[in-house]
Amino acid sequence: METKIKICGLRRPEDIAYVNEFLPDYIGFIFFPKSKRYVTNEEAKKLKNFLNPEIKAVGVFVNEEIDKIITLCKDGIIDIIQLHGDENTEYINLLKEKLRELGLEQKISIMKAFRVKGKQDIEAALKLQNQTDYLLLDAYGKEAYGGTGETFRHELIPKDMPPYFLAGGIGVDNVVEIIVKMHPFAVDLSSGVETNGFKDKEKIKKIIEMVRSIKEEEHE
């Protein structure tokens, strides 16, 4: 199966132009105010209006109030909710209940991210796999919830891991090797496709070409 591609942290009209040209499977808007890639609801709405509808928009949240997430879902700004903080079972169940009340449970998917420092973080992810549509494994950062550009020990991921998004320090130098070795459902890129803190058109183009050129037998 061809590995999916997510380009996260879009915040400028030119970022949207880049992804519309090269068509990753997913893009991410970050709604965490402490992130340098933060966008407001209004900014995200304007960007989504220009996004090719073939590309799914992911909203990235860190311990956010559920009603704020629901507003973005109702307004059609995001297609997938990515929980990148300390959200627990109770939080996810309440979020799903709110989506059900609005008839959005079939339209909006939920992804739970885990920052991996050790085996216990993988175990925590597996415990929540049946409550979410996707799992995301990212590098642990003491001062940040994501987008650190750091990798983690991929050998911690079991061979029978259910389909997952893999993030953390992935770029043109290692993306092919990581995909061939780890077989993630999707790779999630942010700093790996940036230059001086901004999305780089040529890096986005190159990495999407590299991922899509991996032959089927290499995936197996």
Image (tube, rainbow, N blue to C red):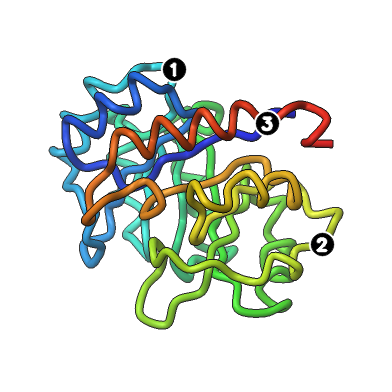
The quadrant of the picture occupied by the N terminus is top right
Mark 2, residues whose alpha carbon is within 10 Å: few (<14), some, or many (≥20)?
few
Give the vertical position of 74 relative to 193 (above or below): above
| Structural distance between the alpha carbons of marks 1 and 2 | 32 Å
Marks 3 and 1: CB-CB under 8 Å?
Answer: no
**Residue 121 falls left or right of residue 108:** right
Q: Residue visible at 77% across and 49% down?
A: 162
Give the vertical position of 93 relative to 57 (above or below): below
Q: Who is closer to the viewer here, 75 or 146?
A: 146
Q: Residue visible at 45% across and 61% down?
A: 84
Could you say where residue 169 lies in the image, as x and y percent from the top left? Answer: 49, 60
Kindly identify which residue carries mark 1.
54
| Structural distance between the alpha carbons of marks 3 and 1 | 22 Å
Could you say where residue 155 lies in the image, as x and y percent from the top left? Answer: 76, 68
3 or 1: tag closer to the N-terminus:
1
Q: In which quarter of the image is residue 76?
A: top left
3 or 2: tag closer to the N-terminus:
2
Label 3 element class: loop
Marks 3 and 2: CB-CB under 8 Å?
Answer: no
Which mark is nearer the camera, 3 or 2? 3
Kindly identify which residue carries mark 2.
158
Give the vertical position of 62 relative to 14 (above or below): below
Looking at the rendered structure, the kind of residue marked 1 is Glu
Mark 1, residues whose alpha carbon is within 10 Å: few (<14), some, or many (≥20)?
few
